[in-house]
Amino acid sequence: MNLNTALRYLDQHTNLEATAGRAEGVSLDRMRQLVAVLGDPQASYPVIHVTGTNGKGSVVRMVSELLKASGLSVGTYTSPHLESINERICWNGDPISDEALGEAIGAVAAVEEVAGVTPSYFEILTAAAFTWFADIAIDVAVVEVGMLGRYDATNVADGIVAVLTNVGHDHTDGKRGWRAAIAGEKVGIVKPGATFVCGEVEPELRELLAATDADRTWWRGEDFDCEQQVLALGGRSLDLRTPSGLVDEVFLPMHGAHQGDNAAVAMAAAEAFFDRRLDDDLVREAFAEVTVPGRFEIVHRHPTVVLDAAHNLDGARACADTLQEEFLLSGTIVFVVGFLEGRDPLEMLEALNASDAGVLVACTPGSPRAMPAQKVVAAADQLGIVAESAPSVDDAVRRAMALAGADDLVVITGSLYVVGPARTVLRSEVDA
């Protein structure tokens, strides 16, 4: 298949990311049948499997840089994407080409009838990624869970290292016991014999998180941690501790104290994979190369424009904390926000400290799950925020840029369906 044909084939299948569906069924049977017909490509290389409510994408990219700096050929699978579907499947940091992606999806399409199943959009992409990684003979795959863990399509792979970044209030109805229920699903990726790197520190979850089939469990705060972090020009300077000792003065070109915790998780995961200490200079070199588009990413100056996909409450709080800690501007803040249904817009705006804004421009994300912009404006009105709506993400970005002065800060946040299109329009106008 060429890419256009492959994307048409994909669009003929249920896309649970777009329709607010839950995990793909109640078992992995369909996915197992699909990869079995493909020859179980996910079993042809070791896998580091990453789950968690927040920070998964950042940890995946950090781990991948550590492995690549160590001389390995690294496949990376993440979701969702910001601008191009190719971003989800990478080799040594480079997205899969259009031709290779078309061929990989085509390989899955060719066996769908033989497998006797109708896979979902996400299952097809996951199988395509596993197949391509096998075809190009990678040394290791770093794989991000799509949702939860136990029944996620990626869980047909058996990670020799399983990573949990944290457990937060997302994909839940919030009823009593929600945290333990989510944690129980996420640790479903921990397989017998694995090393479990656990970034969650909530004491009430300790017994549950300890009851896996892992050969060993490393706990943040005990076996590994970010011992110290200070602001540095363009990022943060970290002291990272793993079971093998301390690496100090590690520069990470990312914003937010939470990224120090993510870095500690990532370094522990890489060390668990190699089962040895990593060279200090290699660690510093790898972390200095980390980029995570759409995660407190500065894409413009005068005015300063920040993209941050803070799509849930924990993400919104992290965004607000980072703004308060790292950005001292003489001007005002202009927010561009858009959310998906299932979020409480009032809670999200409060978590973002959006009351500090000079003005807020709400937009409706380009998704079937989109929350109407007027609903966000109504919530802003309750908080006394000067707010207006724009008919599209592009219009909202252009309106914010028109309102902002050279010394102001424009924060574009909320759904990935806002941040991704905003990144595209901003980059296209800069390039023009």
Image: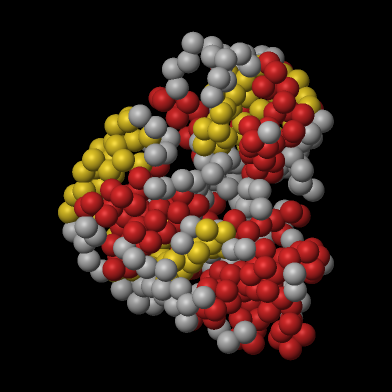
Q: Position of residue 9 (x, y in %)?
A: 79, 69
Residue furthest left in the image: 245
Work out whether residue 288 or residue 15 is closer to the camera in this orientation and state it. 288
Q: Is residue 83 above or below residue 34?
A: above
Image check: 338 left or right of 89?
right
Residue furthest front in the image: 432
Question: How many numbered tags mark residues here?
Answer: 0
Work out whether residue 69 or residue 245 is closer to the camera in this orientation and state it. 69
Give the color scheme: rainbow, by chain, secondary structure or one colour: secondary structure
Q: Is residue 266 above or below residue 391?
A: below
Instruction: Please say whether residue 195 is visible from this viewpoint.
Output: yes
* Quadrant assignment, res 238: top left
Image check: 188 left or right of 384?
left
Q: Could you tell me which residue is drawn at 48 percent across and 15 percent down?
A: 329
Q: Position of residue 323 (x, y in %)?
A: 47, 26
* Quadrant assignment, res 123: bottom right
Q: Could you tell me which residue is drawn at 57 percent across and 20 percent down?
A: 303
* Quadrant assignment, res 208: bottom left
Q: Position of residue 203 (x, y in %)?
A: 35, 50
Position of the N terminus, as image quadrant, is bottom right
Residue furthest top in the image: 330
Work out whether residue 19 or residue 245 is closer to the camera in this orientation and state it. 245
Position of the C terminus, as image quadrant, is top right
Q: Could you tell me which residue is drawn at 28 percent across and 52 percent down?
A: 283
Instruction: Please say whether residue 418 is visible from this viewpoint.
Output: no
Q: Position of residue 307 (x, y in %)?
A: 57, 35
Q: Is residue 418 above or below residue 105?
A: above
Image check: 239 left or right of 83?
left
Q: Could you tell me which residue is drawn at 66 percent across and 28 percent down?
A: 336
